[in-house]
C-alpha cells in the first residue's frame, strides 16, 4: 500500500516537473521521482530539560506533547526519524567520555509507525550530557546521502557540553559534504550563548533559528518545518568544482550548480554559447560564518583569452543570508563576415560555438579566529536562451505634436488640392 | 466623414478582444480561481513561494528568518510590494530591529525601489512595521549589458538586517501583498524572446569536446509565429489611438482646407 502510494506520489511529482519545466534531464527526473522527503528531529534530553518554564510545565513534557502532535499531523509521504541525545547517562555524575557519546535513534527514518514512535517518546527522561555535534553527525548519517534536500530539526535548551567538536563547525562540515542538508534549530528558553550557537548552526546550513517560549509555538513551528521539508526538497543543485583557470574549468549546461569558494578565491566555469544565443548566469554566495561587516561578490563573463565581456556585482554590509548578482550576455557579432572573425580569434573559428568563461570572485573577509575552510557555499545558475535582437524604432506615433503635424499636413494638402481645383476650373471656364 | 465610425468599430472591438487577452497571456496559465491567501514562504531563491499579483501571503515566522517569495511580472507592469509586520511583544524585545524588503529579478540582480520605505527600524515600543517597495516599470526589452527590469520572475526577500542581542528567533507575523499596475511597455514593438525566468533544475557538466546541442528550453522558448504577430499588434498600445486619431484629424483638416479654398464664401460671409 505504501509502495503504491509512494509510486503515485512520485508519478505526480514527475508530472508536475514535466509540466512546469519541460522535459528535465533523465537523471534529474529519476531522483525527484523516487525519494520521499526526509526529516529527522533531534531532541536534547539532557538534565536541564527538567526546568519548568514552558507554560508552567517542564521543557521535556512540552517537547513530548509537541512531538506527539507532529507525529499525528505528519504528511503521508514524509519520512520522519527521531534521535535523542543525553538520554542514558547522568550529568553530572557520569564520566565525560561516555556521556559525550550518548545519542540514540528512537525512531528510524522511514515510513513511520506512529504508535511505536509515540511510545518511545513517552519513555524519555531528561538526564544526561549535551553532545550536539556528535548527534548532528549521527543524524546526518541516519538521513543518508541522496539527491534531495534532507532536514534536521534540532531542539535543545542548553549549549554543547562536549565540545570539541564545536557543533557549529560540525554543521559547516556537514554542509560542505554536499549532502543537501539543512539544519533548523529551536531553542527552549535559551540564554544568549545558546542562542548564538544555535543561530550559528542554522546559518551554516541555510536553516532557521527560533526561540520557543510556549508549547503551542513549538508545535506550530515543528509542523511548519516538517511541511516545508515536504514542499521544498526536490530541487537540489548539482555539485561542481570550479577551476582556477578558464582552460581547465568545467563545462556547464543550463541548470543550477553548487560549489564552495574561500575568501579571495576565484572559481571559473565554462559555458558554450553560439551566436544567436544569450547567456544568463547568476551567482549567490552564502554567508555561513561570522564575517567582517562589508563584503562584495563579483561575477564576470570573459572570453577564453581573458577579455571581459560583462560583469555583475553586488556589495553590502550587515546581516544577510546570501549575496547575489547576475549577468546577461549575447554574441552580437553574428552580422560580421566570417573571414574577419576567423582572423580575429582562431579559437572561435575552430568550433561553431564560442565559449564564455564565468569567473566568480568575492571580497569577503573574516575576523581573526574564524575558520576559512571549507569555503563559503556558492550557488550558480546558468541558462542559455535565444538572444533578443535590438528593436527597430516604433512604427506608430504618439503625443499632441503628432496630432498637430498630421492636422497641419492635412490642412495644407486640402488647401493645395482646393487651389488646384479652383485653378483647373478657372482654366476650363476660360476655354 | 461618416466612414470614420464604421471604420473605428472593428478596430475598437479588435482592440478590446486583444486587451482582454493581454493580461491573461501575461499572467501565465491562470487557474480559474487562485487562492486569495498563501500560508507559506521559501527560505532561499530556489525554494521561493510563488505569489500572484493581487494575492496575499500571510504566515508566522521567527525574527531573523529570511523569507522568499517570487512573482511573475509582464512588460509594462509597475509592481508594488507591501509588507506588514506584527512584531513580538515588547517584553521579549531588547532593542530596535531593522527590517528590509529586497527585490531581485530573475537573475538575482538587486532591483531598485522607486518608492519606499524599503527599510524600517522598529523601535521596542512599536507593535507594527510597514514596508513598501515600488519597482521601476518593467521594460519590454533591454540591452544584455543593462540591468533594466525585464519581464520574468521577480524575487522578494524579507529579512531583518539588524537585530539586537537576544533578538533572533522571536515570533513575528508577516503579511505580504503584491499588486501590479499595467501600462505601456517601452520600447514599444520590442519583446524579449525568453522571459527572465531562472533555471531551477540541477545542471549537468558536459565533456569539453562535446558539441553543444540546442537545449530543449531554448527550443521551447523560441518565439512562435503567432507570438510575433501579436507583438506587432501589441494592444493596449496608445500609439494606435494617437495614430488613428491623427489620421482622422488630418482627413478632417484636409476636407476643411479643400472646402475653404473651393467655397470661401461659406466660411467668410
Image: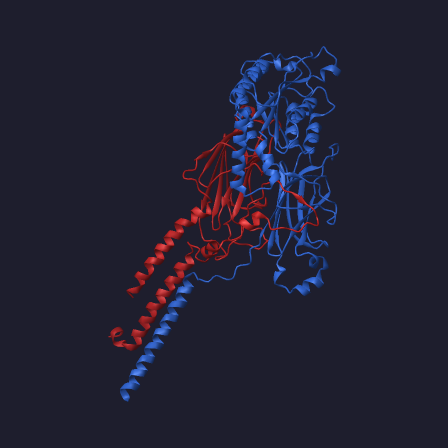
Colouring method of the image: by chain
Instruction: Find residue A6 and report its horizontal and vertical position in percent.
Output: 54, 28
Instruction: From the viewer's side, name the closer residue of B99 and A277.
Output: A277
Instruction: Find residue A195 and report its horizontal and vertical position in percent.
Output: 63, 25
Query: Would you say residue A413 is visible in this rendering?
Result: yes
Q: Is residue A131 left or right of residue B236?
A: right
Does B128 appear above or below B8? above
Question: Which color is chain A depicted in?
Answer: blue
Q: Is residue A361 left or right of residue A57?
A: right
Does A97 appear above or below A248? above
User: Which residue shows up at 51% across the image and 22% down it?
Assistant: A73
Instruction: Find residue A348 and report its horizontal and vertical position in percent.
Output: 69, 57
Query: Would you say residue B171 is visible in this rendering?
Result: no
In the image, the chain rendered in red is: B
Quadrant in which residue A197 is drawn: top right
Instruction: From the viewer's side, name the closer residue of B171 and A105.
Output: A105
Q: Quadrant of the C terminus of chain A?
A: bottom left
Does A278 appear above or below A262? below
Q: Is residue B265 left or right of residue A368?
A: left
User: Which residue shows up at 39% across the image and 59% down it?
Assistant: B241
Instruction: From the viewer's side, name the closer residue of A194 and A298.
Output: A298
Amino acid at each position: 500500500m505504501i509502495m503504491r502510494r509512494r509510486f503515485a506520489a512520485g508519478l505526480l511529482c514527475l508530472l508536475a516537473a514535466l509540466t512546469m519545466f519541460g522535459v528535465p534531464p533523465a537523471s534529474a527526473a529519476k531522483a525527484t521521482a523516487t525519494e520521499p522527503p526526509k526529516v529527522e528531529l533531534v531532541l536534547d534530553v539532557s538534565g536541564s530539560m527538567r526546568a519548568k518554564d514552558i507554560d508552567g510545565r517542564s521543557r521535556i513534557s512540552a517537547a513530548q506533547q509537541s512531538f506527539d502532535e507532529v507525529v499525528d499531523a505528519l504528511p503521508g509521504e514524509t519520512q520522519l526519524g527521531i534521535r535523542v541525545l543525553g538520554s542514558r547517562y547522568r550529568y553530572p555524575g557520569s564520566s565525560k567520555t561516555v556521556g559525550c557519546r550518548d545519542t540514540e535513534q528512537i525512531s528510524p527514518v522511514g515510513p513511520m509507525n506512529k504508535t511505536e514512535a509515540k511510545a518511545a517518546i513517552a519513555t524519555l527522561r531528561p538526564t544526561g550530557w549535551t553532545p550536539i555535534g556528535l548527534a548532528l553527525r549521527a543524524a546526518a548519517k541516519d538521513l543518508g546521502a541522496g539527491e534531495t534536500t534532507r532536514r534536521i530539526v534540532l531542539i535543545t535548551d542548553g549549549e554543547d557540553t562536549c565540545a570539541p567538536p564545536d557543533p557549529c563547525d560540525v554543521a559547516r562540515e556537514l554542509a560542505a559534504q554536499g549532502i543537501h542538508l539543512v539544519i533548523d534549530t529551536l531553542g527552549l528558553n535559551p540564554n544568549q550563548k545558546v542562542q548564538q550557537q544555535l543561530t550559528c548552526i542554522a546559518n551554516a546550513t541555510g536553516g532557521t533559528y527560533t526561540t520557543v517560549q510556549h508549547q503551542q509555538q513549538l508545535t506550530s513551528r515543528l509542523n511548519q518545518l516538517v511541511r516545508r521539508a515536504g514542499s521544498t526538497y526536490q530541487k537540489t543543485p548539482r555539485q561542481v568544482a570550479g577551476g582556477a583557470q578558464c582552460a581547465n574549468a568545467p563545462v556547464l549546461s543550463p541548470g543550477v550548480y553548487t560549489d564552495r569558494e574561500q575568501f579571495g578565491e576565484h572559481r571559473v566555469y565554462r559555458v558554450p554559447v553560439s551566436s544567436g544565443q544569450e547567456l544568463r548566469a547568476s551567482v549567490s554566495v552564502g554567508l555561513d560564518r561570522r564575517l567582517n561587516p562589508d563584503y562584495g561578490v563579483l561575477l564576470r563573463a570573459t572570453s577564453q583569452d581573458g577579455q571581459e565581456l560583462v560583469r555583475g556585482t553586488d556589495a553590502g554590509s550587515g546581516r544577510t543570508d546570501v549575496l547575489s548578482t547576475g549577468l546577461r550576455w549575447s554574441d552580437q557579432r553574428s552580422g560580421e563576415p566570417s573571414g574577419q572573425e576567423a582572423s580575429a580569434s582562431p579559437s572561435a573559428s575552430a568550433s561553431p560555438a564560442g565559449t564564455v568563461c564565468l569567473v566568480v570572485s568575492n571580497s569577503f573577509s573574516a575576523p581573526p579566529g574564524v575558520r576559512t575552510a571549507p569555503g563559503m557555499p556558492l550557488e550558480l545558475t546558468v541558462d542559455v536562451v535565444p538572444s533578443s535582437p535590438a528593436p527597430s524604432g516604433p512604427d506608430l506615433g504618439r503625443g499632441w505634436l503628432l496630432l498637430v503635424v498630421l492636422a497641419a499636413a492635412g490642412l495644407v494638402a486640402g488647401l493645395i488640392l482646393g487651389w488646384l481645383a479652383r485653378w483647373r476650373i478657372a482654366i476650363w471656364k476660360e476655354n | 466623414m461618416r466612414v470614420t465610425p464604421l471604420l473605428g468599430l472593428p478596430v475598437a472591438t479588435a482592440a478590446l478582444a486583444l486587451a482582454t487577452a493581454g493580461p491573461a497571456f501575461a499572467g501565465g496559465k491562470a487557474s480559474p480561481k487562485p487562492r486569495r491567501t498563501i500560508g507559506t514562504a521559501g527560505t532561499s531563491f530556489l525554494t521561493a513561494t510563488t505569489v500572484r499579483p493581487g494575492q496575499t501571503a500571510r504566515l508566522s515566522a521567527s525574527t531573523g528568518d529570511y523569507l522568499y517569495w517570487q512573482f511573475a511580472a509582464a512588460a509594462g507592469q509597475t509592481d508594488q510590494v507591501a509588507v506588514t509586520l506584527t512584531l513580538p511583544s515588547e517584553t521579549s524585545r531588547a532593542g530596535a530591529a531593522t527590517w528590509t524588503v529586497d527585490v531581485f529579478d530573475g537573475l538575482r540582480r538587486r532591483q531598485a525601489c522607486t518608492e519606499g520605505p524599503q527599510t524600517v527600524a522598529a523601535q521596542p515600543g512599536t507593535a507594527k512595521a510597514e514596508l513598501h517597495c515600488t519597482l521601476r516599470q518593467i521594460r519590454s526589452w533591454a540591452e544584455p549589458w543593462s540591468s533594466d527590469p525585464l519581464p520574468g520572475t521577480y524575487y522578494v526577500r524579507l529579512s531583518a538586517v539588524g537585530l539586537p542581542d537576544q533578538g533572533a528567533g522571536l515570533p513575528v507575523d508577516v503579511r505580504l501583498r503584491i499588486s501590479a499596475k499595467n501600462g505601456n511597455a517601452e520600447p514599444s514593438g520590442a519583446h524579449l524572446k525568453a522571459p527572465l525566468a531562472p533555471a531551477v533544475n540541477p545542471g549537468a557538466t558536459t565533456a569539453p569536446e562535446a558539441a553543444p546541442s540546442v537545449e530543449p528550453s531554448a527550443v521551447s522558448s523560441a518565439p512562435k509565429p503567432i507570438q510575433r504577430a501579436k507583438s506587432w499588434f501589441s494592444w493596449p498600445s496608445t500609439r494606435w489611438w494617437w495614430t488613428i486619431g491623427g489620421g482622422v484629424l488630418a482627413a478632417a483638416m484636409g476636407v476643411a482646407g479643400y472646402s475653404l479654398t473651393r467655397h470661401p464664401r461659406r466660411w467668410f460671409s
